[in-house]
Image (cartoon, helix red, strand yellow):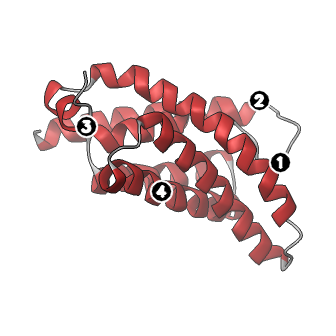
Amino acid sequence: MQNTKRLAIGAMFLSIMLVIGYIEYQIPTGVPGIKLGLSNSVLLLSLYWLGIPFSLGLMLSKVLLSGFLFGNPNAMIYSLAGGTLSMLGMIVAIYLLKEVSCIGAGVIGAVLHNVGQVTVAMWQLQTTKLIYYMAILMLVGVVTGLVTGNVCKQLIRYLPKSRRERFFKTE
């Protein structure tokens, strides 16, 4: 893919992730750390379409820009921990395990995102008592991961044919 085209698609993906993130930021859930995470479906699609290095750059850009626009430096630390662990899990699922569907990768990413954030919270607060909260967030992560994975599954239809054939031999 041409560099200009990749850059344009990446900018579009980043813009979509930021808009979705802003909308989710405005919706109160009443429970700290719980949100749908629909922008992760865009990031998951990016892993299939644009590859690992580009997607890592998108994730880092989203963390930084979201932190500056909607959060604070502390929020960036949580997002970076969750995003990094999530990306690593999705990369392993997609590129190493290969038998994991985009829905499975979405679940893995969502659960690991929550694990990363709670781990940072336990470290910052110097307590292991948050491990109980992690159990709740992991269950929520399964549900939100199913949603984001299904959104990605629907979007995969729009991947260039060569990318679809590489990852989805049955289509």
Q: Quadrant of residue 28?
A: top right
Q: Earlier in the sequence, mark 1 or mark 4?
A: 1
Looking at the image, is mark 1 or mark 4 nearer the viewer? 4
Above or below, 66 against 166 in this view is below
The numbered dot on residue 32 is 1
- The residue wearing badge 2 is 27
Residue type at mark 3: give it.
Answer: Phe
* Quarter the N terminus occupies: top left
Above or below, 58 against 118 in this view is above
At numbered mark 3, what does the secondary structure look like: helix, strand or loop? helix
Residue type at mark 1: give it.
Answer: Pro
Residue type at mark 2: give it.
Answer: Ile
Please state which of residues 130 and 105 is positioned toward the viewer in this rendering: 105
Mark 4 Cα within 10 Å, few/some/many (few <14, many 20+)? many
Q: Quadrant of residue 81?
A: bottom right
The numbered dot on residue 89 is 4
Instruction: Give the percent coordinates (x, y) of residue 51.
Output: 27, 48
The numbered dot on residue 167 is 3
Q: Is residue 20 visible?
A: no
What is the number of callouts on the image?
A: 4
At numbered mark 2, what does the secondary structure look like: helix, strand or loop? loop
Residue type at mark 4: give it.
Answer: Gly
At numbered mark 4, what does the secondary structure look like: helix, strand or loop? helix
Q: Earlier in the sequence, mark 3 or mark 1?
A: 1
